[in-house]
Image (cartoon, rainbow, N blue to C red):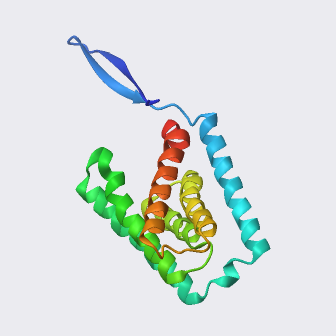
């Protein structure tokens, strides 16, 4: 459902020698709805909750400089390289699939290399921050990216700190990330976009 509406605009010009009429169509995009503001507020509240939890449990102290650099490099590949390839190929509705599969692979690589709680959430938060700088993404997408990371980190915790060591858990993490991102997108972000 698109909120954008197309309206006819009739132009009537009178000259000394005569007159001319033309009809053009213009698109009118309404201002952001309350749903947009609620989505942004929910994203910021989720981010604040994660920051409070990180501070309270001291999660960031677990990450070494090498871990943070690894996460940042993998996030840069996801945010810049895969998104550029997606725009280059331009498969329309299938662009998400072009990005999704390699993103899951790099998420699993990050889990395997870093092996610390909060890796996926930190990875996807970095992806958003890089996307904001490089592509001009909006902060509204914060909740979307955080939901992807939080669900994977929760599953890592539920599976007894299994950082995709088995194929089954890697598949479960990938499917869960895809399911939550699709659900959050179509429930919250698609109506706003």
Report the front residue among 13 and 126: 126
Identify the residue at image location x=52%, y=43%. Answer: 189
Residue 45 in percent (x, y) is at: 71, 54
Q: How many marks?
A: 0
Instruction: Determine the residue located farthest toward the right in the rendered image.
Output: 56
Identify the residue at image location x=58%, y=70%. Answer: 122
Residue 25 in percent (x, y) is at: 32, 24
Report the front residue among 74 and 149: 149
Q: Quadrant of residue 166?
A: bottom left
Residue 46 in percent (x, y) is at: 68, 56
Asked if residue 11 lies left or right of residue 49, the reply is left
Q: Establish if 39 lies above or below 71.
A: above
Q: Establish if 77 lies above or below 113.
A: above
Q: Quadrant of residue 115?
A: bottom right
Identify the residue at image location x=59%, y=40%. Answer: 36
* Residue 72 visible, this angle: no
């Amino acid at each position: 459902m698109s909120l954008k509406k197309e309206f006819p605009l009739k132009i009537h010009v009178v000259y000394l020698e005569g007159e001319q009429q033309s009809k053009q169509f213009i698109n009118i995009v309404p201002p952001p709805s309350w749903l947009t503001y609620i989505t942004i507020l929910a994203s910021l509240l989720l981010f604040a909750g994660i920051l409070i939890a990180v501070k309270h449990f001291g999660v960031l102290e677990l990450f070494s400089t090498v871990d943070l650099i690894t996460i940042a490099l993998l996030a840069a590949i996801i945010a810049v390289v895969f998104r550029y390839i997606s725009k280059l190929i331009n498969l329309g509705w299938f662009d998400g699939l072009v990005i999704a599969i390699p993103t899951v692979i790099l998420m699993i690589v990050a889990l395997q290399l870093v092996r610390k709680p909060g890796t996926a959430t930190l990875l996807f938060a970095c992806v958003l921050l890089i996307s904001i700088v490089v592509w001009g993404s909006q902060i509204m997408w914060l909740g979307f990216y955080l939901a992807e990371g939080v669900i994977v980190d929760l599953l890592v915790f539920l599976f007894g700190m299994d950082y995709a060591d088995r194929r089954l858990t890697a598949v479960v993490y990938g499917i869960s990330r895809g399911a939550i991102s699709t659900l959050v997108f179509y429930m919250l972000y698609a109506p706003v976009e």
